[in-house]
Image (cartoon, helix red, strand yellow):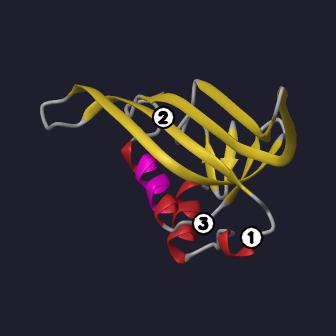
Amino acid sequence: MMMTYGMFVFGLETAAYQELQRASSWRQEAQKRVGRRPARQFLGPGDDTITLTGTLLPAFTGGQQNLDELREMAAEGNAWPLIEGAGTHYGLFVLHRINERKSAFMRDGAAQQIEFDLTLERVDEDNASLFGQITPATLQAITRLV
């Protein structure tokens, strides 16, 4: 297991990623002052974004169905915990965007290679209304992986 996003497990059988990028920001607002540099006021954390980039080879690894499962999770609008296989807990994230590129097509139009980019954005843990709930569809997806 490389990482879990809620109940979705990233790995060779599902969607192995080759690169993880993380961008974090903090809000330091400027207050203009006459004859001096602006004063800065710390307002708290800003955006925390994680981008996972990978390539699926459906003959050997996960395929389109795994990206579709992530799309279903995103369509629910819920936040899920993001936990790395080594134990790092990144916090609660919503799936903001999925980009995919298909190539090396078979005669029936099935792609032999699917490249993807997932963009996850962190949300504060104090908004319980965003927390993901295990739905029957999620439970069914979990049992397929086990």
Question: Tag 3's secondary structure?
Answer: loop
Residue flagged by tag 1: what amino acid is it?
Answer: Asn
Left or right: where 12 falls relative to 102: right
Q: Which residues are magenta?
A: 66-72
Q: Main secondary structure of the magenta part?
A: helix
Please tell me the numbered disc located at residue 78: 3
Mark whose residue sits in front, 1 or 3: 1
Residue 84 at x, y = what percent? Answer: 76, 40
Viewer-nearest of discs 1 and 2: 1
Q: Amino acid at mark 3?
A: Asn
Residue 21, x across and y down, in percent:
64, 28
The first of marks 1 and 2 along the sequence is: 2
Q: CA distance from mark 1 to mark 3?
A: 11 Å
* Residue 5 sits above or below residue 62 on the image: below
Residue found 52% across the figure and 40% down from its top: 118
* Residue occupied by mark 1: 127
Residue 68 belongs to the span the image colors magenta:
yes
Say what secondary structure mark 1 lies in: loop
- Specify the quadrant of the image occupied by residue 142: bottom right
Quarter of the image for residue 46 reads: top right
